[in-house]
Amino acid sequence: HEDQEELITPECKDLMSSLSRGKGWVLIHLYQYQGFWHTTRQLQGVLACQKMFQAQATDLILVSTPKSGTTWLKAMAFAIVNRNRYFCYDDHHPLLTNNPHELVPFLELKLYVDNNVPDFTNFVHPRLFSTHIPHISLPESIKDLKCKIVYLCRNPKDTLVSLWHFTNKLRPKTLEPLQIEEAFERFCGGVSLYGPFWDHVLGYWKESLQRPQSILFLKYEDIRDAPKVHLRKLAEFLGYPFSLEEEKEGVVEELLKLCSFDNLSNLEVNKVGKLSSGEECSSFFRKGEVGDWTHYLTSEMIEQLDMITTKMFKGSGLEF
Ligand code: A3P
């Protein structure tokens, strides 16, 4: 897409010429806008939704750092909010035939991508959207209307390893795969998709402390540790708590099973399907484990990354 000049608006081109440029993961360059690093296509999507997206107070926004389990969160939120329309035992549940990214669209990467003008007429209410946009760059109406935001992040070491695998899958065959050492350098320097990772997390963390009723802050590892507790928390926050009857019927367990890595990754749609934005659905399901970084990072890398995380999160109350 870096080469598809015709898709870049003059406004975006103009802005890009004034932005700092860094080394990309998938394509050649990233651009720093409002403190965060974006691909050209992503940046254009961010600008478009900043300009045009009109939130409604009932909108539910799922925000995450890339590779923190966005696909999983989308599946869980969709299943929770729509469980009266689509029963979780239903053989025709949309999650069985659609990748979660098609059911909960990204604002900047799907709805407003490539100059698209989204049509919201068929959206059911409450509308469910997702984004990786950092807090500082969120469309104003989301902040003004205090839309409910669920924020998901993940241990930076697993995030890095997952991002490295993912971006290498997306890299054009004409480019050499990115080596882990290079990915590590860029990640540590903050030059990663929607990075710096730590600033992204801190932006939402601080907001969640100030406005806990509007922002639910979640970590991938915590959900893995106690899935039932977190699914209930998510349902309650979104305004769809489980009733006693549902609890007795095992709906919580059923929803978790429906959204589990094993279930989703083995569905035909996620094994062979492609997203409308071009990515293979299978690229969103790799291992789904906590601590896979032990297989890829050297002890020096681990020490350095941990040091950065400790320094960046010092005094914030955040730990990984
Ligand atoms: P790994 O690469 O470590 O396996 P995102 O959805 O934000 O792109 O994040 C992708 C990461 O979440 C990948 O991590 C992927 O395997 C994992 N993942 C995807 N679906 C999941 C699910 N249903 N449960 C747990 N993890 C999941």
Image (cartoon, grey):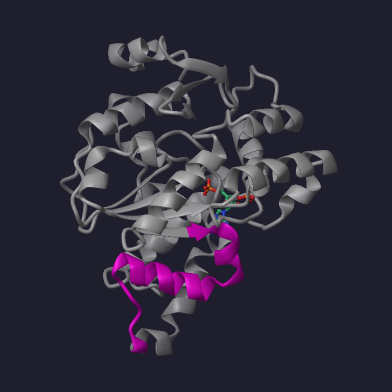
Residue 158 x, y percent position in the rendering: 66, 48
Residue 93 seen: no
Camera-nearest residue between 96 and 199 = 199
In this view, the residue farthest toward the right is 299
Residue at 41% from the left image edge and 90% from the top image edge: 248
Q: How many marks?
A: 0
SS assignment for the magenta stretch, majority: helix
Residue 281 x, y percent position in the rendering: 51, 45
Which quadrant of the figure has residue 319? bottom right
Answer with left or right where residue 201 lies relative to residue 48: right
Answer with left or right where residue 177 lies relative to residue 278: right
In this view, the residue farthest toward the left is 121
Which quadrant of the figure has residue 85? bottom left
In the rendered image, residue 63 lying in the magenta stretch gets the answer no
Which quadrant of the figure has residue 308? top right
Residue 216 x, y percent position in the rendering: 40, 60
Answer with left or right where residue 59 lies relative to residue 87: left
In the rendered image, residue 229 lying in the magenta stretch gets the answer yes
Is the residue 233 above or below the residue 2 in the image?
A: below
Magenta region, residue range: 218-244
Is the residue 230 above or below the residue 112 in the image?
A: below
Residue 23 seen: yes
Residue 293 x, y percent position in the rendering: 73, 48
Residue at 49% from the left image edge and 34% from the top image edge: 194
User: In which quadrant of the rendered image does the C terminus lie?
Assistant: bottom right
Residue at 43% from the left image edge and 63% from the top image edge: 76
